[in-house]
Image (tube, rainbow, N blue to C red):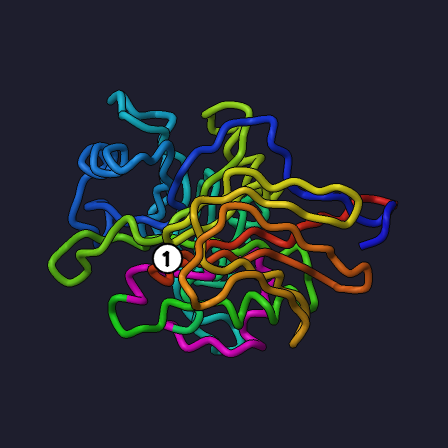
């Protein structure tokens, strides 16, 4: 992470916008319309949502209805690749010509060719191996999936994320709902991302996500993420623990079990680490994560 090879990822010049990158509507197997979802999530403080129905590419810009938040496009693909490995992949972006009949592998490549951001969805729930996670050069992975956590406790993707970060440090980590909001899957507002962007527009939100200028959360908030040389300081909602997470066993921590809460933490980032991100945990055990704190720049 030396100077000239990487730079600090986070910029605080914009505004914080809460959003969700994995949702289902009545267009596929969800229980709510886009209008119903928009008003539900807006009431919980959300500014944007992605439409990621199964095998249905969305076109939010064509909507006639005025929603109380910003809708962005996406699609969820599922199936076996040519090696027989099974995946669910959330593709963020606006796509054309993607159909189930073309097969999973061809559809995934078409989404990538059209500039999509490819997110490995709920890998523990799907039963993916670490080799599966590494195979398709995904842009990101779901570190927390609320519906899968509710279904059978397999919503945690952090081990996959760390495996990917060890080889591809720019891999993004995202928390999401995967909300269906029906009798079989009632949960929502359990996992989300908060993006720092100059404005609430499709272009600005998409650019911020691609740059990794966001954090993921199941409860606590980062209010500021700044860097001075190799010292990273965060301002947060009240938390009980803050952790610097690095490769394998390497890390550092602040906080204890005595119950004292704090709202600021500073960590020195070792220069020889391949990656480093921050995790905070509140008194209820809910967590939030930055992305890898540094992004690669051209030499």
287 left or right of 34 in image: right
Residues 238 and 23: in front is 238
Is disc 1 placed on a helix, strand or loop?
A: helix
Image point (75%, 41%), residue name: 228
Q: Is residue 204 above or below residue 245?
A: above
Task: Please indicate, yes or no, whether residue 88 appears anywhere in the rendered image.
Answer: no
Residue furthest to the left in view is: 183
In this view, 68 is above or below 34:
above
Q: How many marks?
A: 1
Residue 229: x %, y % from top left: 79, 44
Query: What residue is drawn where x is 46% and y is 54%?
Result: 288
Q: Position of residue 138 (x, y in %)?
A: 57, 59
As displayed, is residue 136 above or below residue 230? below
Vertical placement of residue 94 versus 135, above or below: above
Q: Residues within 10 Å of mark 1 (few under 14, many from 20)?
A: some
Q: Which residues are magenta?
A: 125-149
> Which quadrant of the figure contains the N terminus?
bottom right
- Residue 80 colored in magenta in the image: no
Residue depicted at 23% across the width and 46% down the height: 25
Task: Estimate the x, y position of residue 67 in percent, counting from the top left.
Answer: 27, 25
Foreground of the two, 289 or 188:
289
Looking at the image, can residue 253 be seen? yes
Rendered location of residue 211, percent (x, y): 62, 41
Residue where numbered disc 1 is placed: 100
Quarter residue 156 falls in: bottom left
Q: Quadrant of the C terminus?
A: top right
């Amino acid at each position: 992470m030396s100077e000239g090879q990487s730079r600090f990822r986070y910029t605080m010049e914009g505004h914080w916008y809460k959003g969700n990158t994995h949702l289902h509507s009545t267009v596929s197997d969800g229980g709510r319309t886009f209008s119903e979802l928009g008003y539900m999530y807006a009431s919980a403080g959300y500014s944007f949502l992605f439409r990621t129905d199964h095998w249905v590419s969305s076109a939010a810009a064509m909507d006639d209805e005025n929603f109380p938040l910003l809708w962005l496009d996406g699609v969820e693909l599922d199936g076996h690749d040519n090696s027989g490995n099974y995946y669910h992949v959330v593709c963020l972006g606006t796509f054309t010509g993607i159909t189930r009949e073309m097969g999973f592998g061809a559809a995934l490549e078409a989404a990538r060719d059209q500039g999509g951001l490819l997110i490995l969805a709920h890998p523990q729930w799907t039963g993916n191996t670490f080799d599966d996670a590494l195979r398709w050069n995904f842009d990101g992975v779901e570190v927390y999936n609320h519906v899968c956590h509710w279904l059978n406790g397999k919503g945690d993707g952090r081990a996959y994320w760390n495996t990917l970060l060890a080889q591809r440090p720019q891999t993004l980590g995202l928390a999401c709902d995967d909300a269906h909001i029906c009798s079989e899957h009632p949960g929502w507002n359990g996992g989300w991302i908060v993006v720092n962007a100059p404005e609430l527009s499709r272009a600005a939100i998409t650019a911020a996500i691609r740059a990794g200028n966001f954090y993921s959360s199941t409860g606590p908030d980062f209010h500021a993420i700044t860097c001075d040389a190799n010292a990273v300081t965060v301002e947060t909602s009240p938390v009980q623990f803050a952790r610097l997470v690095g490769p394998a066993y390497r890390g550092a921590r602040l906080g204890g079990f005595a119950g004292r809460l704090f709202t600021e933490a500073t960590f020195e980032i070792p220069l020889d680490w391949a990656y480093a991100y921050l995790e905070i945990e509140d008194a209820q055990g809910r967590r939030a994560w930055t992305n890898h704190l540094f992004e690669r720049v051209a030499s």
